[in-house]
Each structure stands twice: as structure tokens, then as C-alpha cells.
Image (cartoon, rainbow, N blue to C red):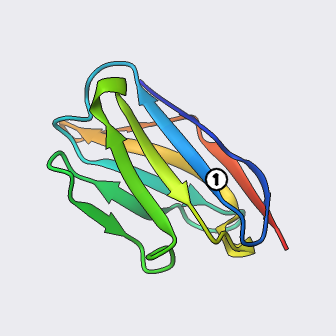
Amino acid sequence: QLQASGGGLVQDGGSLRLSCVASENIFSRNIINWYRQSPGKLRELVASIGSGGSTHYADAVKGRFTISRDKSKNTVYLQMNSLKSEDTAVYYCNVLIRLINYWGQGTLVTVSS
């Protein structure tokens, strides 16, 4: 149901924009999350956007990442600026519907120092 894209290789201080497209219009009624997982680490919540547009960010990305939503395209974006090597991870979009977690396939972000 979720298709993530936009990852790649970027230098320290660079920017990337990730996209998460849903196969149906689920974004208008649910909280959409971006998670990331680095090798050897647990998956962690990066950012969330609610159905009303409210947003939440992990402390590590506040001021650098912006989550947004385009309902007409069933797409949620994660704009990532001032990237650091510690942002290197596989990024996943996620939605919880009726107690079931749905995950996109993940997109790899590599930040070179």
C-alpha cells in the first residue's frame, strides 16, 4: 500500500526529499510516519504528520527535516536538509490502520562525510 522513494547518496550538508505514495487515499484519516533504521540500531521514529496537519519530529532532526502532505497525490514527503553522516539509514514510511502497521519498502539514504 505504501511506496517510498527518493533516497540516494548525498554529501554532508546536502539535501534530499523522500516521497511516500499510498495506493489509496489513506492519508486524510491517518497519522503517517517516517522511520529510519541504521545498521545495528533499532528502527526509530523520525517524523509524523496527523490527519489535521499537525507534525512531530524527533529531536535529532528538528529544524532540519520537514514532513508534509499532498492529499491530491496521496503522497507524504520528508524534506531533509543539512544532512549529517548520522542520518545515514534506510527510511521507511508507515501508517497504522486499525492496529495494523503498514510499511513501505524502505529507501536508502547515505550521507558521505
| Relative to 51, residue 74 above or below | above
Going by the numbered disc 1, the residue's amino acid type is Leu
In the image, residue 62 lies at what x, y percent? Answer: 44, 76
Q: Nearer the viewer, residue 18 or 97?
A: 18
The residue drawn where x is 21% and y is 41% is 30
Q: Quadrant of residue 57?
A: bottom left
Quarter of the picture containing the N terminus is: top left
- Expressed as whole percent of the image width and height from the top left, the position of residue 7 reads 68, 45
- 46 with respect to 70 (left or right): right
Secondary element at image label 1: strand
Query: Crowding at label 1, few (<14), some or many (≥20) Cα neighbours within 10 Å?
Result: some
In this view, which residue lies farthest toward the top?
24
Q: Name the residue at the right extreme.
A: 113
Residue appearing at x 56%, y 65% in the figure? 42
For the point 66% across and 59% down, the residue is 15
**Nearer the observer, 101 or 10:** 10
- Say which residue label 1 marks: 16
Residue 92 drawn at (x, y percent): 52, 46
Q: Name the residue rendered at 45%, 52% in the picture.
A: 34
Is 22 situated left or right of 111 in this image?
Answer: left
The reply, left or right, for residue 78 in relation to residue 41 is left
